[in-house]
Image (cartoon, rainbow, N blue to C red):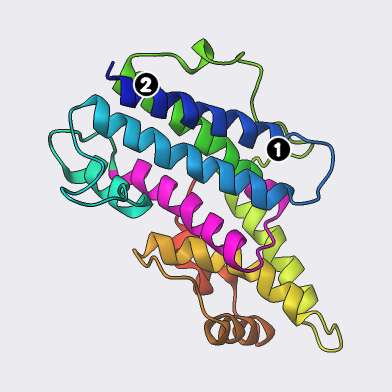
């Protein structure tokens, strides 16, 4: 393995382990944000390691900065020399990145069940890529017991969204005065829906307010988030 690829892989695994550690920590202060930040960093470094391992470049000639997250995903998805991602895998990584972006730059409120889905799917995909690209097992780097753990793991993704939607409806009910909280919660669903539609920008306040107005008017989550409704665990 090329030395640069080896060092990038090691640092990506460091970030993954720290993300799992934060997910499993017994207190909530900054837990969602740090879990997503570290998981997102783990994937960016892993993709750069994969590109270098297969002889590709991670910076344009003459440029000082390495490729950003989106460029790494595109290269690993479409460059035949280094290709290692399927469309579904790329979408998983992009959803995590979009949620990280929302968490880093403003406010995001993800339910425990949603966070578990993203963390566990991230760990599973990370392990698949480490094996397919480098021929290594993830357990070579940390014990197989180190995985996201939840006291209420989701059994059905639609049930998770249904519960989240019920919370949002309660927050926008007349007299609730919880619109900021409602926007923080609905933002995670809007981010995932946008990612499924290939939109990389964050939803604006006007867009979120329109969604909340539709919720108050009685629209169902399947109508507002048809892409999310099509997802399965």
Q: Residues within 10 Å of mark 2 (few under 14, many from 20)?
A: some
Image point (73%, 47%), residue name: 31
Q: Main secondary structure of the magenta part?
A: helix
Image point (44%, 39%), residue name: 43
Residue under numbered circle 2: 6
Quick one: which residue is furthest to the top in this view? 140
**Looking at the rendering, in which quadrant would you find the N terminus?**
top left
Residue 22's mark?
1
Relative to 26, say whether 168 is above or below.
Answer: below
The answer to which image quadrant residue 102 occupies is bottom right
Name the secondary structure under disc 1: helix
Image point (51%, 73%), residue name: 223
Q: Tell me if residue 207 can be seen.
A: yes
Observer-nearest of 29 and 228 = 29
Quick one: which residue is furthest to the left in this view? 80
- Left or right, residue 30 beside residue 114: right
Where residue 105 appears, as percent x and y from the top left, is 58, 66
């Amino acid at each position: 393995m090329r030395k640069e690829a080896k060092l990038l892989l090691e640092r990506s695994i460091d970030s993954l382990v720290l993300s799992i550690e934060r997910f499993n920590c017994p207190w909530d202060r900054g837990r969602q944000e740090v879990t997503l930040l570290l998981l997102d960093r783990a994937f960016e470094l892993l993709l750069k390691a994969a590109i270098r391992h297969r002889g590709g470049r991670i910076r344009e000639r003459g440029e000082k900065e390495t490729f950003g997250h989106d460029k790494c995903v595109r290269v690993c998805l479409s460059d035949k020399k280094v290709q290692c991602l399927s469309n579904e895998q790329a979408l998983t990584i992009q959803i995590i990145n979009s949620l990280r972006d929302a968490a880093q730059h403003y406010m995001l409120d993800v339910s425990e069940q949603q966070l578990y889905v993203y963390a566990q799917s991230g760990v599973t995909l990370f392990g698949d890529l480490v094996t397919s690209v480098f021929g290594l097992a993830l357990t070579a780097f940390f014990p197989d017991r180190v995985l996201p753990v939840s006291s209420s793991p989701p059994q059905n993704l639609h049930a998770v969204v249904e519960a989240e939607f019920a919370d949002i409806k309660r927050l926008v009910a007349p007299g609730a005065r919880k619109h900021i909280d409602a926007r923080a919660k609905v933002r995670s669903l809007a981010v995932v829906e946008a990612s499924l539609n290939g939109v990389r920008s964050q939803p604006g306040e006007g867009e979120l307010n329109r969604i909340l107005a539709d919720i108050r008017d009685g629209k169902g989550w399947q109508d507002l988030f048809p892409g999310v409704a099509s997802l399965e665990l």
